[in-house]
Amino acid sequence: MTRLDPHSYFDTTQPKTRHLELNWFIDFVRRQIDGSVRLLLEGPSSGPMDLDTKGLTIKAAYLDDGQPIPFHLADEEPILGRRLRLELPDGTKSFGISYTTSPDAIALQWFEPEMTLGNRQPFMYSQCQAIHARTIVPCQDTPRARISYYALVTVPEETTVVMSAGPEGRIRDLSPGICAFRFNMPQPIPPYLLAIAAGDLEAFDLSPRARVWAEPEMLERAAYEFGEVEQMIQTAERLFGPYEWNRYDMLVLPPAFPFGGMENPRMTFLTPTVIAGDRSLVDVIAHELAHSWTGNLVTNATMDHFWLNEGFTTWAERRILDAIHGEEASALRWAIGQAALDEAVARFGADSPLTKLRTDLQGIDPDDAFSSIPYEKGSRFVYVLEHQVGRERFDRFIRKYIDTFRFTSITSEEFIDFLEQELPGAADAVKANSWLYETAMPSNAPAFKSEKLDELIAAANGFAEGRRPGPKQAGKWDSNELLVFLQNLPRELDHESLAWLNQNFNLTQRGNYEILVEWLTIAAGSGYEPVFDRVRQVLLEVGRMKYLRPLYTALGKHARTRALAREIYSQGKARYHTLSRRVIESVLDKYDEGNQ
Ligand code: BES
Ligand code: ZN
């Protein structure tokens, strides 16, 4: 037995899947997917084959001629789920499994019509990263086991389905009241990139290869917000090589989506909180687009190498934005990331193994290990490499890296070997081992400086001492500048200062959620009652964990607002995604314990 991934029962000595054929019936009433999957193997195989499952009811396993295959579902393991072991007869090239998902499959979130913008149709979507694909299909759920897939998805006739794949048409005359959509993903992807959404969706074309999908009520705003996407694709292609996924479409999800974005190939999934009205939060698009190279083409082998996905992508995202919007604001983007990095290091503790880039997540749920560290520490590691060898050489290296490892999944060690081969000495020169294997930040972590950044930090420090920035100065700040100013303020302020801030920057009414949440976090943490209604509104609407954690923390850490936090949570709980619930409960439980 050889298991390479601590989060999968995938065994390298067993047969390997190369393709999935999904046949799914979306049941909005019972909140489950009924259906089957046919697994096509790399070659004729026999003997035991282990698949990952979680919460699945397995009805039957059978060869293509219908002959049953013996199988056994092992006991539930809390993180991994249940191992499904099949005994394949000699010469098996493909076989089928019929099954049903559980109504609380972690990968799926379901919405009644009343919970959508249009109130007309139910809605559902999936989020499979990191290890939730197994809650919607029995599979070898590890990024090393890449698969192509075909899907036939049956839904009520008024419903539109999108997937992380190319659409191959809709079949309307199946039987009364239902229709089916066909999809094909011909390129081999890690299973965590399998994705589906179904509901009342319409599309708007932004360019010949990019369109945005959303509920009709949201479409116009989304179309404006993402209007720069073709320019971003072209910029990314100049930096990282040809875009290999054919189309780049985007889907705007309901606000309960627990992430900012998810890089599902051909169909990025997005939180509506990025729609600020002024394109000020399109860094999320640059990020998910950049994953088309770093993540979807070159993929982390397991979650222990997650920084290869997110660190490279965060670096790539900033290179795209620098190329489009100029490098003047670059230091600000890095400074905003630094605040998230500092928060994560403080939360885990500077000596926590979770602050290493190369982690050891045996026995640890990847959802619990999630933080800004792989993003911000990882991107800084890439940045110091870039600056060690010079941009021109590094850009050539990155293109070769992507070209060499495209459609494969690699480890940190494989990356370092390649780095040593292509740029000998660079790894040692930047202390790569310290970046990868040591906790917190290495001594050669870059410091980002600019005049603007100095000005904003000075203004924030001055504010803490009672000096107000003048309208001539502050009136010119753009969104990121205001955000940096707010991030550098003390976490608690007196009410007079808070009233001044709100009056002068109109903070409670901001459409930019980064600014809004930063403001509400300071104000709520200061016990400033005038914002409580807005805090409640945001918490009841938005499920993005990046916003829930600081807001619930701000309320939870003080005895005076702890009951309010609990009350808002009990009101909003039913509408939160499982992952959002877990984050909130961990925050609230921590402060309750501290209280006893
Ligand atoms: N792939 C991630 C989201 C993710 C990571 C989901 C791990 C599940 C497990 C996505 O690309 C991401 O990083 N999203 C960020 C965007 C931000 C860094 C611009 C987010 O959701 O905040
Ligand atoms: Zn990402």
Image (tube, grey):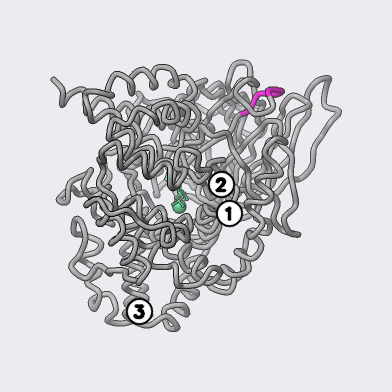
Q: Report if the beta carbon of the residue with label 2 is closer than 8 angstroms to ligand 1.
A: no
- The amino acid type, in three-letter code, at marker 1 is Arg
Nearer-the-camera pick, 207 or 127: 207
> What residue is drawn where x is 47% and y is 41%?
259
Residue that label 3 marks: 421
> What residue is drawn where x is 35% and y is 56%?
469
Nearer-the-camera pick, 413 or 359: 359
* Distance in Å between CA atoms under marks 2 and 1: 6 Å
Q: Are marks 2 and 1 in contact (CB under 8 Å)?
A: yes
Residue that label 1 marks: 279
Residue 519: image location, x then y, percent: 38, 42
> What residue is drawn where x is 48% and y is 31%?
135
Residue 307 falls in image quadrant = bottom left
Q: Is residue 180 above or below residue 475?
A: above
- Work out whether residue 203 can be spotted: yes
- The amino acid type, in three-letter code, at marker 2 is Ala
Give the magenta part as a residue range: 119-123
* Distance in Å between CA atoms under marks 1 and 3: 41 Å
Residue 290: image location, x then y, percent: 52, 60
Residue 525 falls in image quadrant = top left
Nearer-the-camera pick, 362 or 256: 256
The crowd level at tag 3 (other Cα within 10 Å; few <14, some 14-19, many 20+) is few
Residue 159: image location, x then y, percent: 73, 29
Q: Is residue 171 left or right of residue 406?
A: right
Q: Is residue 455 above or below residue 495?
A: below
* Quadrant assignment for the N terminus: top left
Q: Is residue 244 left or right of residue 90?
A: right
Residue that label 2 marks: 276
